[in-house]
Amino acid sequence: MRVPQISNEQAHVAWNAMNDAGEYDASEVAFEYIGSSEDDEVFTDIELMDLHDDLLGIIDKFSGKNKKNIGGQIDSEVVASVYNAVVGKVGVYQLSQIGFWRWLSNIANSGSFWKFVKWRFESDKQVNWGITSPGSIIEVYFYRAWLRGHKMFDANLSDPFHYAKLGSSDVWRSHILRQDFGRGLIYMTPYHLNPPLSCVGVLRGVRSSLLAGLCLLDGRTGRGLLPRQGWL
Amino acid sequence: MEISVSSNNKITFSVTRNDLLFNFATKFEDVFRFTVGADDALTSQQGVRLQEALGYDFQNECNPIVEIVPPGELIEAATGQSAESFAVFVTIEDVALSVRRVIQVIDVADIQEVASYKIDLNSFADMGFYRGFVLKCFIARKSDVGPESQIIWSKSQIVYESEFIVKSTVDEALFEIAWTTFNDPAEKKNVLFFVDWSSNEVSSAPHIDCFQVKANNDAKSQFKRLENNPVFGELCIRMVAERIISDLAENALRCAELDMEPLEGSLHEKMRSLFNDLGLDFDLMAHEYQQGDKQDQLSVVSRVSRAIQRYTQIAHTLSAVKFGGYRKS
């Protein structure tokens, strides 16, 4: 499928319209598309109807609660919905491109996903909506949700998203995705559940190349790595 | 063995063998060789081996090959341990996705002659290589032993590593402008831009988590006109940029954590690189700023201000401005 993408400039215009008036008329926007021109199928809002419904359910579930306390739970619940909305339809190469996530975050579905991010953060940090450079793509809210699913999906588990859901948003941003060791396909269960800051120091001291497999960090003591089968 | 028949009916038998000494690495730097594809020579040169514009199809255009020269004797000479305890590991990382996986694990004992491995980038369905890839080859133990028994005892101790980078060019600016509609009527009317600081973790957090350069969205069209003005546009834009960079520089000097290596993409790291371009030592000046008295701080700020004006070429741009006059109609 070809997927739409927009520039930072186009995203700025949409973001400000949404922020000012709560709506943005994208009918005049000329989208570029990522994908083969021979592919007639285009990824549209229709593909995102389930995601839209799921996010409304999440808003309903957590409405009125202090998002500073339960923000991580919201972010965990979003993972499977975002992943399922694109998997099998959009290629990894396309999903690596920030232009698609800008479109999804600011314009798709009449701005409903823009409103979700606004509800989640209640801030005007535009990077959450993809208004940033390609090098900072992990800071984009929906991209990060997809990447959590992409990295940690395990079809052999009763809940394939078990590990993708573990851990708060801050742990994922600061202590996994931004770190070199986080590039390995890692399962850090105790670390997710109880991440002492000292763990970060411990991990930084380890040669990251070796963390390319399965590993387990002792989250209770924050000391040492406990290599398991398949570590390398 | 070769058999050849010459024109005068002479038959020549020749026997050759590989020069084993030549085929064994004489230093670790020779162990791993890499090529991106047809036009790239197979060499041990590390670092960036190919850089293309964003959008280049690395997955289909590159045919990387890694060649491994037997490292057994080197390992034994360097560690005093049997090479059989070691293996060569090859990992590939998708730069855009920040996903890395091990693609080869080869016992050193099995590498008796030069081994060549073709890497089919299309075989990695979970990677797209939109921004390129990093290939790492390293030598490490296959399993741990007691810490006291050997110099190299843990799998995490790397005997030698080579890193080959194939990546896209990404225009990573020092800052990006967030055009924002201000709520306060007075700000909406009078404020053009400001640096909105949200965190002092300039060394440990990505720069976008520390600050955002906000500009007045209502003034955007006028700002764009100014930017395109052939007479004063460039000067004005440079002055704005200089003001922002100076703000970022001073606060980076004030808040930098000098006892740690800055995170990649942090303001500290970006400023260190900028200062390097300016011929200044960021960490030294930050130390002077943080440890010195108020006079020392003023002195540092003064030097930085001059350097950044030099960088943004304010005076040179002013000198190029052509002043005309206004004729009365």
Image: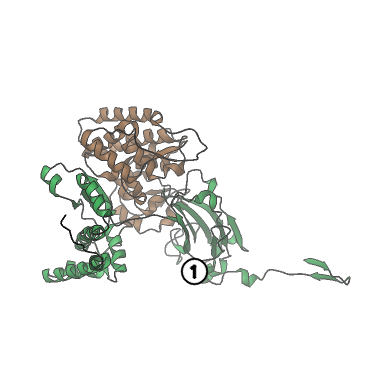
Chain colours: A brown, B green
**Residue B65, horizontal then vertical, whole percent:** 56, 57
Left or right of A37? Residue B173 is left
Residue A130 in view here: no
Please tell me how many numbered marks the rendered image carries. 1
Classify B107 as above or below A98.
Answer: below
Helix, strand or loop at label 1? It is helix
Q: Amino acid at mark 1?
A: Thr
Left or right of B99? Residue A116 is left
Q: Quadrant of the C terminus of chain B?
A: bottom left
Residue B218 in view here: yes
- The residue that mark 1 highlights is B79
Classify B263 as above or below B288.
Answer: above
Q: B239 and A15: which one is in front?
A: B239
Classify B56 as above or below B3.
Answer: above
Q: Residues within 10 Å of mark 1 (few under 14, many from 20)?
A: few
**Residue A170, horizontal then vertical, whole percent:** 28, 45
**Residue B242, horizontal then vertical, whole percent:** 22, 61
**Residue A197, horizontal then vertical, whole percent:** 27, 52
Residue B309 picture quarter: bottom left
Q: A187 and A69: which one is in front?
A: A69
Which residue is painted at 28% across and 41% down in the image? A13
Q: Quadrant of the N terminus of chain B?
A: bottom right
Q: B302 and B258: which one is in front?
A: B302
Query: Which chain hosts label 1?
Result: B
Left or right of B66? Residue A10 is left
